[in-house]
Image (cartoon, helix red, strand yellow):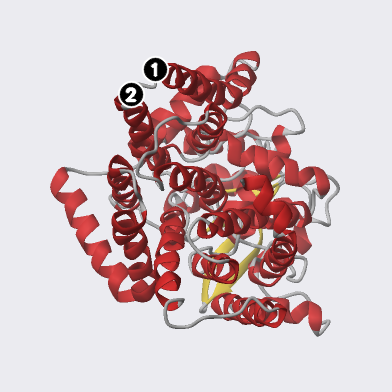
Amino acid sequence: MLKKTILEEKNIFVVLFIYAFLLIFFCSLMSPLYPFNDWSDINLYFNIGKAMFHGQTLYTDIFDHKGPLIFVIYGIGSLISEQSFLGMYIIESLTWVLMIFSTYLIARLYLDKIYAFAVALIFPVLLLSHSSEGGSAEEFIVLFEIISLYLFIRYFKNKEASAHKPAHMLLHGIMCTVVIFIKINLVVFWVFPLLAIFINILLKKEYKNLFWNIFSFIGGVLIVSLPIVIYFWVNNALSYAWDTYITLNRTYAQIGDFSRIMENLIVRFYQRLKYDNYEFVIILIGAVYFPFKYIGCRIGKAAIILSFASLYTVIFMAANYVFYYSMPYYIFSILGCIVILDLVRKYIRIQPHWYFYLLFTIVALACGIKTKEFFSRSKEVILRQKQPNDVLHKFYNIVIQEKNPTLMCLGLDATTGIFTMANIMPNVKYFISPNLPYNIYPEMRDEQTRYIEDKEVEFIILSGASFSYDYYRALPILQENYNLESTFEENGISTYFLYKRKK
């Protein structure tokens, strides 16, 4: 069925392919259209990934507390280009291509081609509203969710769903394990649908099928997890990986007690209605109404609703919520769009002429561009102006004058992009400081103090927004071993300081 759909509707997939690349070309700062993506998070991912592909070991030689596979993705991108995000633009674009293809296939289970095509155009525009500068861990996770969502909906669609294809369960095992090793809490998306599949097979007394599905799921888990475990085992880093990715993140999450969790969930539900309004309404339609109306399998109805509820809970219950964290639950807007367009087609019949496909694509692309409004970032290139007068370029022009410079950023801000622009390979474990308070992870600041004392890096950047700003500004050994080379002011206040090692 899937192969037949792709072959018979290949022209639609070609259009969606072009649409995805154009959308990311205009709507992600990874794109070569824009001078540089200065988002600190993705520069951190990129340079850790690059260091890993140059032989350094994650969590022991270089540090961040995210899951290992996000760094692998960025490491692959660095193989194409080490000083720019060209490789990541290609990877990001292909990610959105697969997301949009999967969206179309989900919609095709219920809608005619032209309406399913519209859903595939609308969903990425909705998703862009929370994609930040492009390339977040959550953005890549959306792809793995959508692939599984297609298979879940396909299975639960019919009331008499019984036997489940082991090959599909293998894919589920791979998809959810990849997410475990990127951002572990988001694996809750899979819990209830998978449980529903196993229960449904058991209730149908398909014992052989149950065995092969369990076997296939375990196989999918092992396909992803074994190479990762072997990597850390060979590099004597298994305990470091556990302590960092599991233990540290559990502490950092700062979930709070039950009353605080409920307060966060209720307040953020209200905020979604107030600020995301129509997007959130579409998501709720997809998460609640769609299962009741369009899912035939009774246990499948509950599974989809509970999947949304659990995903919403883990995204919004913690104190340290950031707007792009909510990207993964936007997949339910696909189901909401299906409901809405299914209603529309009862009153408006659109003929599948080529000019409608073209018109819808142009309108969707324009809406996506309007959503991001990144064109101001490219004016320096388009108008051939000088480099932007920002801290990133000011400090970069100083650092790059030295041969093979080394650098440490005592915060997580735009200056992390200097590592990428200057192709500086990290030479210390804590070369960039994630936003971890000293009371949660004291080792980072203690080690960075030792680097300063031993003069292990040539340049040091301190930001006024750093968690340990007051500590470093008053640190005597920093003044003894380093000269203040330059400062950068924002709003009349010196908020960035560049230090250079004394001879």
**Dot 1 corresponds to which residue?**
207
**Dot 2 corresponds to which residue?**
202
| Disc 2 + disc 1, Cβ < 8 Å | yes
Residue appearing at x 61%, y 55% in the figure: 135
Counting the numbered discs, the total is 2
- Residue 441 pos. (x, y %): 41, 35
Q: Camera-side residue: 8 or 484?
A: 8
Residue appearing at x 52%, y 50% in the figure: 146
On the image, which quarter does residue 413 sit in? bottom right
Q: Quadrant of the C terminus?
A: top right
Asked whether residue 45 is in view, the answer is yes
**Amino acid type indicated by mark 2:** Leu
On the image, which quarter does residue 155 sit in? top left
2 or 1: tag closer to the N-terminus: 2
- Residue 259 pos. (x, y %): 13, 49
Label 1 element class = helix
